Image (tube, rainbow, N blue to C red):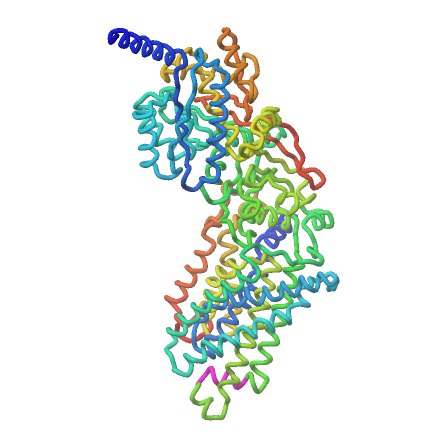
Amino acid sequence: MKKLLMATTAAALTAGMANAAGHSEIKIGVILGFTGPIESLTPSMADGAELAMSEVTESGMLLDGASVTPVRADSTCVDAGAATAAAERLITSDGVKGIMGADCSGVTGAILSNVALANGVVMVSPSATSPGLSDAEDNGLFFRTAPSDARQGAVMTEVLMEQGLKEVALTYTNNDYGKGLADAFQAEWEAAGGTVTISAAHEDGKADYSAEVGALAAAGGERLVVAGYVDQGGSGIVRAALDSGAFDTFHFPDGMISAQLAENFGSEIDGSTGQHPGTDSPGKELFAELVGDAFDPSSPFTPESYDAAALMMLAMQAAGSAEPGEYKDHIMDVANAPGEQIFPGELAKALEIIKGGGEVDYVGASAVELIGPGESAGNYREIVVEGGEITTAKYR
Amino acid sequence: MDFLNALVALSNFVLIPAIAYGSQLALGALGVTLIYGILRFSNFAHGDTMAFGAMVTILVTWALQAAGISFGPLPTALLALPFGIIGAAALLLLTDKFVYQFYRRQKAAPVILVIVSMGVMFIMNGLVRFIIGPDDQRFADGARFLISARDFREMTGLAEGLAIRSSQVITVVTAVIVVAILFWFLNRTRTGKSMRAFSDNEDLALLSGINPDRVVMYTWLIVAALATVAGTLYGLDKSFKPFTYFQLLLPIFASAIVGGLGSPVGAIVGGFVIAFSEVTITYAWKKVLGYLMPESLEPDGLVQLLSTDYKFAVSFVILIIVLLFRPTGLFKGKAV
């Protein structure tokens, strides 16, 4: 009797273990700044990533029915020490196979160099945009579904070059955003054969920009590039330039483009151009439908978070393994052409195609296209001001 | 032709903006210098007095605009100016009654009054933000340009445009009128003479029967008028934002000290010295020189002495130089 009991228990155990092997659990870390400066954005970002995971789990297609469990951790956005410790815990105690995160560029770099590299874990950040991360040493482990800020400089150069311009004057708001964007643009522009006649900073919150405009006008140029903020000094510069007749047309990066711009200047800036992140991909609407009222799908970086998690899981399927060292090489493949385009809500279909040996081109909620060292090319809406209205020229 | 182009470019980017800015600084510095001369302390609350006066003017302007009253091609704010002056005068007289009077009776040292005026500055600063908010306010209306750059180019056929904004002309004209009235008042009227007497020698003035309370009251009234006019003109010409008036305090004090604290003529000259140096030193001379020089000598660089980031530093450098070599200022004011 006793032997029988033991045998049954043993059989049950083995069965249980076999069962567990069939429906294994894969853990993915979600490390975002749930406290700190961007704590208002992170809940919907995490929800976005977890939505992709539950979609995959429900489909039962990943690696023969594996379930994906998210494990949240707090990056704090600003405290590199706390973020590193949190990531360390995710890997050593929770045993995550990949990290969806981190969010801010500083902590992302810290986790990458201190934890992810040392443990060989894949990281896909939905929101780190610092150009510095493009050159960071990553052993092919680091990806991002957000474009580097340097990318906008390249797009800006394309837009202006296509209009046949050769000489521009450049002014930027005196902070990390303005300076970074201005430097990125100047490097791209000069590499493409253009000339920057002057690159001058302006301070926000001044009443009078006539001295700055005087210098810009003296340097001259066919167009004035204003890398500033529309509700700050950027508008002051444009106003002073128009008043003194120094420049008639301008080029505006993302910080300048809003309804406020058209309201401030109307048809005075007709013929001006600009670009800001934006996409006409159907992915965005599909994502919004998929989310419904569960959380805010249009909150910044939420679509990117869904895409970051989805990419990791599709790459696992393509590699046939959840081990970071094996699936890291497949992320670029699933993200880019060739293959069937995959939109939000179609993860099950994608898993099935990959399982059948086919190829997918993941488009997702944010029209993902990974370039260079595994970062999003970003999608920009090129605008032109006509009759006092901001109109879409095209998407690129 | 080249010479004309150079002249026009210079006027458009240097002369006209500097003259307008200089007039605004001069009006502000006159207020500071009067308080220093008669009440004998440096009033740090002056920038925020300007903001307060301009704020009242703006509120009345909005009311007038809403009622459909306009001033033809001139900005409605000029109609609202008297109300702004009354508002600022009420504020200053109340502050004097509740704050400065106490310290004056105690014969407090000037340095204590300076600190007191700083406290007053923060309160006024908060008051303005509380009433109108910290953001930019738009209240200019009427014709924007006397002549716009595009029209000028079409009229003259020159390559360079010359833009003259109506606010710049109004600033200069108003400043001239206000200064003329002020000097007439100080030199010709009985009250003005008694104020100067009080400023020159307080004890002697008291002995000869001058009522000190009246002198103090008139000083505040004049300062209120000067501050409101300066604040409103600055807001019209540039933009109204409470914080910029706080920043304006520095060039205003620099103007008053360079000219010689306590000397009205000095305040005016100081205002223009500061304004012209700020603009000319940070101006890139490439274009003007390009027109004037023969082609072979045309400059490649921008020929800019200092980047525009250092605009505020210029007034301080001038201030230090003047204090080192002429501590009483250009026009023999009182030693600081």
Q: Main secondary structure of the magenta part?
A: helix
Marker count (numbered) = 0
Q: Residue A215, how many percent across, how many down? A: 53, 47
Identity of the residue drawn at 46% across and 31% down: A46
Q: Quadrant of the C terminus of chain B?
A: bottom left
Q: Residue A247, how many percent across, how many down? A: 62, 43
Q: Is residue B137 above or below residue A138?
A: below
Q: Can residue B12 be seen in the rendering of this structure? A: yes
Q: Residue B55, how many percent across, how many down? A: 59, 64
- Frontmost residue, B174 versus B50: B50
Q: Can residue B19 be seen in the rendering of this structure? A: no
Judge left or right: residue B251 versus residue B163: left
Q: Is residue A240 above or below residue B50?
A: above
A282 falls in the magenta region: no
Look at the image and give the residue range highlighted in magenta: B193-201
- Frontmost residue, B331 versus B37: B37
Identity of the residue drawn at 68% across and 44% down: A266
Q: Residue B282, how many percent across, how many down? A: 49, 52
Judge left or right: residue B292 versus residue A36: right
B200 falls in the magenta region: yes
Q: Residue furthest front?
A: A1
- Frontmost residue, A326 versus A376: A326
Q: Residue furthest left?
A: A2
- Frontmost residue, B86 versus B177: B86
